[in-house]
Image (cartoon, rainbow, N blue to C red):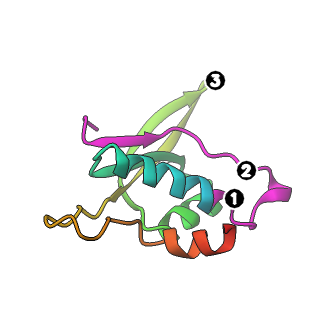
Amino acid sequence: MGDESLEIERIYIKSKFQKHGLGKYLLNQAMEMAMELDKTKVWLGVWEKNENAIAFYKKMGFVQTGAHAFYMGDEEQMDFIMTQTLTPAPLDGQQPRSHPHRTAVRSRTQ
């Protein structure tokens, strides 16, 4: 996707630990890192049949921007490419840019 983007390769949370904010926390850490590195986009691939993950990423502001075929053994599978464009920092530098879900997650983890 280019030098302006950061790829999230994998976020896996064991089932018994899901729905506790860990995925949001990890995703927000990646978003913060992307902003610190002056990236304009964050993207990831998610298996087309992983409905929970797709719903989570949509909730977190990602949109599907493509698809990529891959093989698991002899079987062709599909990953959806999901992307989020980051809000640029203001020119005056007065307010830091932020991820739209960061505040809510921070309040839970502090």
Q: Is label 3 in contact with label 1 (beta carbons under 8 Å)?
A: no
Name the chief secondary structure element in magenta: loop
Q: Tag 2: residue type? A: Ile
Quadrant for the C terminus, please.
Answer: bottom right
Span of residues in magenta: 1-23
Kindly identify which residue carries mark 3: 73
x, y percentage for residue 29? 53, 52
Give the residue displayed 51% in from the left and 62% down from the top. 57
**Helix, strand or loop status at disc 1:** helix
* Residue 8 within the magenta-colored segment of the rendering: yes
Considering only vertical position in the picture, is 61 above or below 72? below
> Label 3, label 1: how many angstroms apart (C-alpha)?
31 Å
For disc 1, the marked residue is: 22
Q: Amino acid at mark 3?
A: Gly
Residue at 28%, 47% in the rendered image: 38
Query: Image height check: is 7 above or below 32?
Result: above
For label 2, the crowd category at 10 Å Cα-Cα, with few meaning under 14, some 14 to 19 and many 20 or more, is: few
Q: Residue 70 location, x and y as percent? A: 49, 31
Q: Which residue is mark 2?
A: 13
Q: CA distance from mark 2 to mark 3?
A: 24 Å
Q: Amino acid at mark 1?
A: Leu
Residue 49 part of the magenta segment: no
- Taking the view exactly as shown, the residue that stands out farthest to the right is 16
Q: Is mark 1 in CB contact (under 8 Å) with mark 2?
A: yes
